[in-house]
Amino acid sequence: MRLPKANGSTRKRSETGKAEGAAAWLRLLDISGPTEPAHGLYDLCANMIERNEIAYISPTKCLSRQQELVGNKPEKEIQLDASKTALVIKEQVGG
C-alpha cells in the first residue's frame, strides 16, 4: 500500500483537516486480529505524543495484542558489567 501523494497547492490546511485526512487513510489499515498492536505499544506512542518527541521503538517491543495477552515477552540475557559490580540485562532479539 502506498501513501497518497501530497497536494501541490500552497495553501495550508487546518489541523482538523490534517487529522481527518490521516484518520481516513488509517481506516484502510487492518490492525485487528494477529496484526493488532499490544496496548503497551500504544502506551509508548502516547508517551511520545505527550513529550512531543519521537523515539526509536525496538522491534522486540512491538508485540501483538495476542502475544501481550498470553504473556509472550522477549527473552532476556543477564550479564555482569565490565567492573563486575552490577548486572546488565539485555533483551534477546529473535527467539
Image: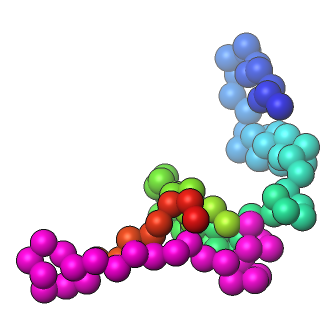
Left or right relative to 36: residue 82: left
Asked if 88 appears above or below 57 in the picture, the reply is below
Residue 1 colored in magenta in the image: no
The outermost residue toward the top is 8
25 and 84: which is toward the camera? 84
Magenta residue span? 64-87
Residue 71 among magenta residues: yes
Give the mark count. Answer: 0
Pick the residue in front: 38 or 49.
38
Q: Quadrant of residue 32?
A: bottom right
- Residue 60 point in image, percent of width and height: 56, 63
Residue 5 drawn above or below residue 76: above
Q: In the displayed image of the protein, which residue is found farthest to the left?
A: 83
Tell me which residue sits at (73%, 33%) in the image: 13
- Which residue is found at the position 13% from the left and 72% from the top? 82
Q: Is residue 49 visible?
A: no
Which residue is found at the position 77% from the left and 29% from the top? 3
- Identified at 60% across, 76% down, the residue is 73
Colouring: rainbow
- Which quarter of the image is occupied by the C terminus? bottom right
**Which x, y percent locates residue 30?**
89, 51
Name the spot of residue 22 as percent of width and height, x first: 79, 43
Can you say which quadrant of the picture contains the N terminus? top right
Res 40 → quadrant:
bottom right
Identify whether 50 is placed above or below 56: below
Observer-nearest residue: 81 or 59?
A: 81
Q: Nearer the viewer, residue 73 or 37?
A: 73
Task: Report x, y in % for residue 66.
Answer: 80, 73
The furthest residue to the front: 95
